[in-house]
Amino acid sequence: YFATVFEGPWGDEHPNGVWNTADPVDQFTMFKVTERFLMEQIEVGNVKELLQSSVLYNLVRLKQSCSEFIKNNSRKVLMNEDFMKLATEDKALWSELRSFLR
C-alpha cells in the first residue's frame, strides 16, 4: 500500500521528498494520506481487514467507508467466509456493524 500512497505531489512540501516520522504533524498527515488511499482500495476481499485496522488505528473515515461499502455490497460481503469470521473474532465490532446495517 505505502508505495502507491507516497507517489505524488506530497514530496514537494518536504526536503528531498522525505517525511520526518518523528514530527507529529508529518505523522498525522501520513495517517490521513494513508487513510484516504485505503478508502479507495476497499473491496470484498479486504474490507474485514480494513475495518479492523480502522478500529485499531482510530481511522474514523476509513471505518465509515468500510461500513458503507458493507452496506452497499452486503450480499457479496456476507457471503465471504473470511468476513463472516468477524462475528466470532470481534463480537463488539460485529454488534456495531449489525446496528449500522439495520
Image: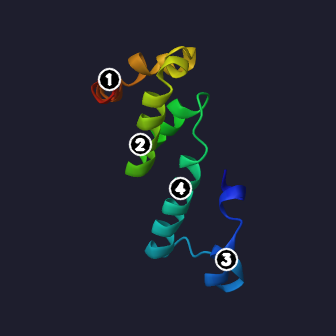
Mark 3 near mark 4, Cβ–Cβ under 8 Å? no
Residue 11, disc: 3
Identify the image quadrant of residue 20. bottom right
The earlier-in-sequence mark between 3 and 4 is 3
Which residue is at the front of the view, 72 or 10?
A: 72
Do we see residue 59 in this rendering? no
For badge 2, the amino acid type reads Lys
Residue 36, disc: 4
Find the distance from the CA under tag 3 to the CA under tag 2.
Answer: 27 Å
Mark 2 near mark 1, Cβ–Cβ under 8 Å? no
Find the distance from the CA under tag 4 to the CA under tag 1.
Answer: 24 Å
Image coords of residue 91 (percent x, y): 33, 22
The earlier-in-sequence mark between 3 and 1 is 3
Q: Which residue is mark 2?
A: 63
Extreme front residue here? 72
Identify the image quadrant of residue 41. top right
Circle nearer the viewer, 3 or 4: 4
Identify the element where label 3 is drawn: helix
For badge 1, the amino acid type reads Arg
Do we see residue 92 in this rendering? yes
Identify the element where label 1 is drawn: helix
For badge 3, the amino acid type reads Gly
Vertically, is 102 above or below 62? above
For badge 4, the amino acid type reads Arg
Q: Residue at x 45, y 67 (%)?
A: 28
The earlier-in-sequence mark between 2 and 1 is 2
Identify the element where label 2 is drawn: helix
Q: Which residue is mark 1?
A: 98
